[in-house]
Image (cartoon, rainbow, N blue to C red):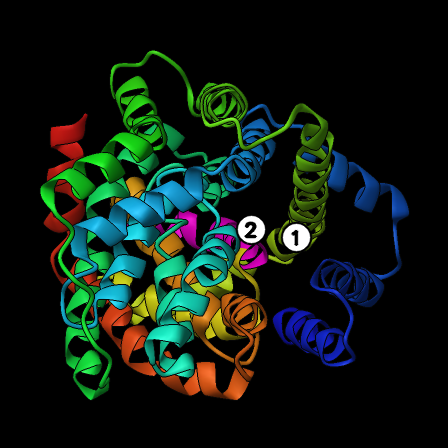
Amino acid sequence: MTLLLFAGSLLGAMALGMPIAFALLVSSLSMMLSAGGIDPQTVALQMINAADSFALLAIPFFLLAGEAMSAGGLSRRLVGFALALVGHRRGGLGHVAIVAAVLLSSLSGSAVADTAALAGVLMPMMRRAGYDAGRAAGLMAAGGIIGPIIPPSIGFIVFGVAGNVSITSLFLAGVAPGLMMAVALALTWSVVARRETVETLPRASWSEAATALKDGLLALGLPVIILLGLKFGVFTPTEAGVVAAVYALLVGIVFYRELAITAVPRVLLSAVRTTASVMLLVCAASVSAYLLAIADIPAEVRGLLEPFAGNRTALVAAMMAIVLVAGTALDFIPTILILTPVLMPIVRSAGIDPVYFGVLFVMNNAIGLITPPVGTVLNVASAVGRVPLGRVTVAVVPFLLSQVAVLVALVLVPELVTVPLRWLR
């Protein structure tokens, strides 16, 4: 009954157009009211406790790095490097988008930011070249969701805090699955691009490729610094966020000289606004998660999953099915914060590797960003690319299926995550 009340009030508030953070608070108050009365002190304490986390400090710094990267010319240079690398292939600009998505995801960790950057730079080029705008925007959206998988990842940070799982291990474990998602997208685009009748771009000469590499070398250095620093324990994920932010600002201001000192306050303000919206979601969702735990919802879910308890693969598949359905209605951060406390006790009692589960869980939630009716990243690709949402939603289906296929492969073969993780450790 409590679960139905929570879901009904949440979806009802969202249907009325209420922002997701406030809809979560409404659903929490509904559960409180049904339990005997509203306690404002509990709401306030849970929201404050949720924000009081050292690990969550990484979020504003990585968001600042993403803003500085975009304003300082790092994003554009990464796209230019990808263009020189694969722009000459059939459907070349689509492959450029995929390579650029991987490179951008290693800098910002935000699907929304990566999609906006990709669509902003490449959509005009693909339009001029004659690509179908809906198909191109669908590819941008599908490429953008690689952002929360390849480190640094805001999703891994939030999951690590909510599930008490090592964020460093999650970062390292996300590298191989993120690259698998990119390969799946490239294969799908190779099939889909056969319908395109555009001319292929000329192959970049060795000197042009060397120039593009030299131009983007400083931008490419950031993910290397972060990965090596985490692998060898030089800094924590939170400290990695500080390194990323300072590095992006320094490169944009001093080396590329595209980020003026006078523009830094605007970059900071943009990062603060995004951080505020993310943290409000974190705080609001923590209240719902607390009340669901008080109502013993994890035990109810454990009872529903009891038939699968004898088979770890079947149990993981069942949990992924629940997450996939929830992701169609909820946004990325709320889904992680609500379902993590519910599912993690089941994961640990079944002896499933929490890091392995975390990678699948966050990937599943990222896929939810391109599934209607919420589909946050679909809306970003539609708005930035100036393509009707309906066209983007239809065009993203082949790419969505390819990402689901990767998820299924990881469920069936856990070694695809655990073996590369052991090597990186």
Q: Quadrant of residue 295?
A: bottom right
Q: Residue 97, image x and y in percent?
A: 31, 60
Q: Quadrant of residue 230?
A: top left
Q: Residue 215, image x and y in percent?
A: 31, 33
Would residue 349 be seen by someone viewing this image from the given angle?
A: no
Category of crowding for the residue at label 1, using alpha-carbon neighbours closer than 10 angstroms: few (below 14), some (14–19), many (at least 20) = many
Q: For mark 1, give the secondary structure.
A: helix
Tell me which amino acid carries mark 1.
Ala
Looking at the image, which is closer to me, 203 or 7?
203
From the viewer's perspective, tell me whether residue 211 is left or right of residue 21.
left
Q: For mark 2, give the secondary structure.
A: helix
From the viewer's perspective, tell me whether residue 407 is left or right of residue 27.
left
Q: Quadrant of residue 331?
A: bottom right
Category of crowding for the residue at label 2, using alpha-carbon neighbours closer than 10 angstroms: few (below 14), some (14–19), many (at least 20) = many
Q: Which residues are magenta?
A: 333-350
Whether residue 349 appears in magenta in the rendering, the answer is yes
Q: Residue 10, image x and y in percent?
A: 70, 71
Would residue 405 be seen by someone viewing this image from the given angle?
A: yes
Q: Which residue is mark 1?
A: 285
Q: Residue 337 bears which disc, if any? A: 2
- Alpha-carbon distance for marks 1 and 2? 6 Å
From the viewer's perspective, tell me whether residue 421 is left or right of residue 380.
left
Q: Residue at x 13, y 50 (%)?
A: 416
Q: Quadrant of the C terminus?
A: top left
Q: Residue 20, image x and y in percent?
A: 70, 63
Q: Residue at x 51, y 18 (%)?
A: 254
Q: Is residue 6 above or below residue 366?
A: below
